[in-house]
Image (cartoon, rainbow, N blue to C red):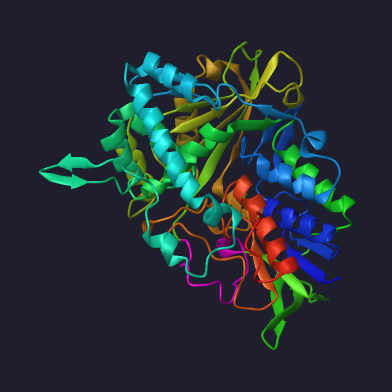
Amino acid sequence: MARIAVIGAGLGALATAARLAVAGHRVAVYERTQTYGGAVRRFERDGFGFDTGPGLLPLPAVYRDLFVKTGKEPLEACVELVQVDPSARHVFADGTEVSLPNASRAGVVSALDEALGPGAGLRWGDFLVRAREAWDRTRRPLLEEPLWPNWRVLADREPYPAVPHKRLLRTRRAGTLAEVGAWELRDPRLAALLEGHALACGLDPRLAPASAAVLPYMEHAFGMWYVRGGLRELARAVYERCVARRVAFVFGAEVTRVLEKDGRATGVELAGGEVVDADFVVAPGGAAGLPVRGEGEVPPRQGLPSRLTVLLALRGARPEGTAHRTVVHTGDREGELESLFGTVPAVPARPTVTVLRPGDPALVPDADHEAVTLGATVPAGAEIREEHVEALVAAAERAVPGLRDRVLWREVRTPADIAAETGAPGGAVPPPALAAAGGRLLHPANSTGLQGLFTAGGWSHPGGGLPHAGMSGALVAGLIVEGPEFRGSQ
């Protein structure tokens, strides 16, 4: 039985702790704040409740596996999972609207043909077939296995089978997500639908590789899910599973240093000077963690965006048939991308806004009120002003007529709030790992150059997002329990 110190209590760290504890190790988690969950938090006031981090769960199989492997109670016995249908309603710049069924290719094709015109659905359906091929080629190395030592193979090889495109007597293939939209989808609304998935992950579709096609594919293939009571309930369930497996938690404990001797991690030092001995240490990686020696050759991520979130308490009931999620696409996509990813990043004047309307009785004081969350991608470290908040509300009014007249109060969550909760500089939010692009979208390996030190969470392989953070826990636990020969779940 090894002594294991886990730094931080985000979802990746909790998943690691639960798996190691059930393997018989003595695990202690040291969290600098007073609660668990990392970015998966809840804000409550006057009987209203809001998720302040992720609002939906893709690929729930990751957490189903975690609960199967760590106890007798399955995930569904601990939280209530609800499949969101439609998966999303989209409001495009020209006023066109479409609601896309959850996990139904035929339904999506039909809905797009009806809303955007004949042929639109077929082009999107054909794109999903190619996106599936990219997913099949990268699923194991980018989600289910430790990062390959020869990771350059992933960096240099584009897994998306782009369609040949003739331009100026030359035949070319799309190398970026924006080129996929322009050359293969051939409709600005379909392109906006595609690029919106990259933007939601803080990626510039003009630079994101074509392999980013796996992002909409994951949503299409595995559906989008909501946890009744909010995503904070998932964090609670994972935390309680850790407690049931006798993981010790020390809150308000900031780790300032990983201790080492003779090339091996030997414990951690807390802000008050207390030293905790350990046989293994699990730390956050990259931007969210302590400097980690020898994280591998993958270059550190730079210049990642954050999120601006506006929580709205509304008078009046949620109308019957309201979509859980609506994406209001900007009318100035180039301006939005230049603001976010230009030389001097700035908050877009006209952002793409996601509107979440859960319709969950647990989040409102009674049936005559509604809790609505608005979200947009903004630069990390951005100073949020009133005009930025108003831009989100103005965009949301395209999806929620009469919105302003229903507002009782609002709460604004900025990049500074994310930074305080996660420790990531400027409140940066990590994207999932993607192939190609020279390795720019890979994350450092879970193993480090210091023996006995591992990294878990969104800033380590396989990257950001709830499923990926959960998988980082499985990978780190496998590496500690089985050793460097561990190659992932079979």
Residue 295 colored magenta? yes
Quarter holding the N terminus is: bottom right
Residue 273 or residue 6, whichever sits in front: 6
Query: Is any part of residue 144 visible from this angle?
Result: yes
**Relative to residue 342, is residue 312 drawn left or right?**
right
Expressed as whole percent of the image width and height from the top left, the position of residue 210 reads 37, 46
- Image side of residue 251 versus residue 287, left or right: right
Most prominent secondary structure in the magenta stretch?
loop
In the image, residue 427 sits, relative to residue 222, either above or below, namely: below
Residue drawn at 53 percent across, 41 percent down: 308
Q: Is residue 427 visible?
A: no
Q: Position of residue 354 (x, y in %)?
A: 51, 31
Q: Relative to the observer, which residue lies in front, 273 or 25?
A: 25
Q: Residue furthest left?
A: 169
Q: Most extreme residue toward the top, as rendered?
A: 320
User: Above or below — where is 472 with respect to 92?
Assistant: below
Figure quadrant of residue 336: top left
| In the foreground, 486 or 208 | 486
Q: Position of residue 100 (x, y in %)?
A: 49, 22
Q: Quadrant of residue 488?
A: bottom right
Which region shows up in magenta?
285-301
- 296 in magenta: yes
Quadrant of image for the C terminus = bottom right
From the top left corner, tell me how far across and down residue 212 is, in percent.
Answer: 43, 46
Give the tally of numbered discs.
0
Question: In front here: 398 or 178?
Answer: 178
Left or right: 368, with 288 as reference point: right
Taking the spot 47% from the left edge, 37% from the top edge, the residue there is 216
Q: For this view, does 160 lie left or right of residue 418?
A: left
Vertical relation: 118 (above or below) 197: above
**Figure check: 55 above or below 288:** above
